[in-house]
Amino acid sequence: MNTYLIKNACIINEGQRIYADVLLKNKRIEKIASSITTKELCIEIDAENEFLLPGVIDDQVHFREPGFTHKASIYTESKAAVAGGVTSFMEMPNTQPPALTQELLEEKYAIANQTSLANYSFFMGASNTNYEEVMKTNSKKNEVCGIKIFMGSSTGNMLVDNALALDKIFAESELLIATHCEEESLIKSNFEKLKREKDFLEPSDHAIIRNEEVCFTSSFKAIQFAKKHNSRLHILHISTEKELQLFTNMIPLENKRITAEVCVHHLHFTSDDYTTLGNKIKCNPAIKAANNKAALWNALLDDRLDIIATDHAPHTWEEKNMPYEKAHAGLPLVQHSLSLMLHYVNEGKISLEKVVEKMSHSVAKCFQIKERGFIREGYFADLVLINMQQPTTVTQKNILYKCGWSPLENFTFPASIKNTFVNGHLVYGNNVFNESILGERLQFNR
């Protein structure tokens, strides 16, 4: 493995900006100092006028393998991820077959071990009937990111709506429990009501069918289970203003038992965008009215929301370009999440320090990831260099998702991702990939 010396970088880390050199050796950050010279053979990178950030850790992606590789694979989507500055990901269990047994979970790790360009972890999936398999994950608490519970519609048999099953998992899990919270009975009721009122449903109806009450009711229920058992709960992709009353900024993140995530598309789009983008922005939970977007931004900045993620969920263009009721729900986003947040940095909406906190530091703290998420001597060298003066436009030619499209196509970001290091390996630099060294399985301090 090569040794790298990054010179003259502006390092964004732990709320500070410092100008320094960084030496990367044997997968890790060997040294950080105002000026580093070495007699060792190394590759020097001049980072003058560029920012060095800890690599993004995305705690919610769907890379579709096994079973749906016509949409995506761990290889293709991890490649898109590192091109976007994402150095680690945590992938969801609703593949085919779904990861509902320890054997199936380990099969996904085996695929990633052979193909992933980024570091990786996988959630163990829960169902109404696999309690014993879920509990076996407790013995792997240093090796698995958490348990995923779909408390709303999902693929396969992964909807968990049995109160006894939920209570048992919340009572006994020693790992973080991540929930998709949408109340299934309300979704069905809203859908049936609209079908009676309208002959033809359209994409904008998605925000009505999966409305604020659908999300709040389910999130409130999850929190009641967590409080009953003092469980470690993480609620994914918060999308409504109403849900924000359920979370606090009065406790340091390290001490929170209940945390929350917001996704980039809920910070960027509103229901007004269905007019031009239609099913391209159909996702669960739905993109809703503008008051929700404004409230999410406020809660992100005041720390009621702890993490920024993507819920990267690719589908083929054919699967999206169907009538509303048949169109698949989900957006491909992992290549562009950091770039989109840099757009909001440029707009003055959020600081670069806060972006790093919410996309790297807080994810590492929330999941207790071992020696990642910060630029510290001795930590793994998961790093990204960005140029804030070099705009980038999303085009079909530079989209790396296997599905080949993006809801952000033709959008111009004010910045570019120049280099991405994974475990000290320059896997992506100046639009060129070096795939000779793969990512590693994440480990956790639990």
Image (cartoon, rainbow, N blue to C red):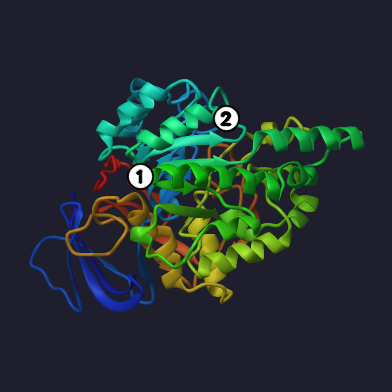
| Closer-to-camera residue (243/347) | 243
Q: Which of marks 2 and 1 is in front?
A: 2
Q: Which residue is drawn at 44% across and 62% down?
A: 358
The residue carrying pointer 2 sits among few (fewer than 14), some (14 to 19) or many (20 or more) residues within 10 Å by Cα, namely: some
Q: Are discs 2 and 1 less than 8 Å apart at CB?
A: no
Under mark 2, the amino acid is: Asp
Say the numbered circle drawn on residue 118.
1
For numbered disc 1, what is the local secondary structure?
A: loop
Residue 365, how many percent across, how many down?
Answer: 33, 56
Q: Quadrant of residue 17?
A: bottom left
Q: Which residue is drawn at 10% across and 69% down?
A: 38
Give the alpha-carbon distance from disc 2 to disc 1, as whole Å: 34 Å
Q: Quadrant of residue 99?
A: top left
> In the image, 19: left or right of 2?
right
Under mark 1, the amino acid is: Ala
25 w.r.t. 214: above or below? below
The residue carrying pointer 1 sits among few (fewer than 14), some (14 to 19) or many (20 or more) residues within 10 Å by Cα, namely: many
